[in-house]
Image (tube, grey):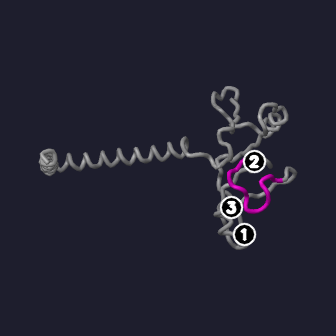
Amino acid sequence: MATADRLLRDLSYALRSLRRTPAFTVTAILILGLGIGMASTMFTVFEQILIKRLPVQNQEQLVELSGVGAGAGREIPLSLDQYKQFAADNRTLESVAAFGHWGAPPSAVMDGDRLFSVRRAVVTGNFLRYSAQDPIWGGSSAPKTRPITVRSDQILASWSL
């Protein structure tokens, strides 16, 4: 009981001190709020990038390949020709799939009289085989001879099919 009384007295003293210096109180509250907000934001980003599992099967078996451009000093994605050469020469990996999104710029798509803005990516025919979710229509292996379109749930819900 003595500890609770002492805690209440200390809390009362702290509140009286903060009431006497309103500028300091506002500054302290703002700094605490910014610090807590930044910590929450950083944790969310960290969780999304490093902790949250990718929506693929056997994530621990995935490998990302990239190259280093001459004089660039940084990683760059493989070109389609480099991917094809690597896939043909591959003797170590079970299979090789590729994707290209180029920053996923929005593209305008017309459906009748409605205009949609969609983000797109180009993938190889075997890419969807490694997805954790099966496509709603068709199979998980696309034909390799012609391009196909894969639509997200959001687009399927908004388009009249």
The circle drawn on residue 127 is: 2
Contact, mark 2 vs mark 3 (Cβ under 8 Å): no
First along the sequence among labels 2 and 3: 3
Q: Helix or strand or loop: what does disc 1 sit on?
A: strand
Q: Nearer the viewer, mark 1 or mark 2?
A: 2
Question: Within the image, what quadrant is residue 159 found in?
Answer: bottom right
First along the sequence among labels 1 and 2: 1
Q: Amino acid at mark 2?
A: Phe
Residue 22 lies left or right of residue 71; in this view the side is left
Q: Position of residue 131 (x, y in %)?
A: 70, 50
Cα–Cα span, label 2 and label 3: 24 Å
Q: Helix or strand or loop: what does disc 2 sit on?
A: helix
- Residue 20 visible? The answer is no
Location of mark 1 (residue): 111
Q: Position of residue 19 (x, y in %)?
A: 14, 51
Label 2, residues with CA under 10 Å away: few <14, some 14-19, many ≥20: some
What range is drawn magenta here?
A: 130-142
Q: Is residue 47 magenta?
A: no
The circle drawn on residue 108 is: 3
Q: Helix or strand or loop: what does disc 3 sit on?
A: strand
Decide whether the magenta segment is chiefly helix, strand or loop: loop
Q: Amino acid at mark 3?
A: Ala
**Residue at left offset 85%, top offset 35%:** 88
Q: Amino acid at mark 1?
A: Asp
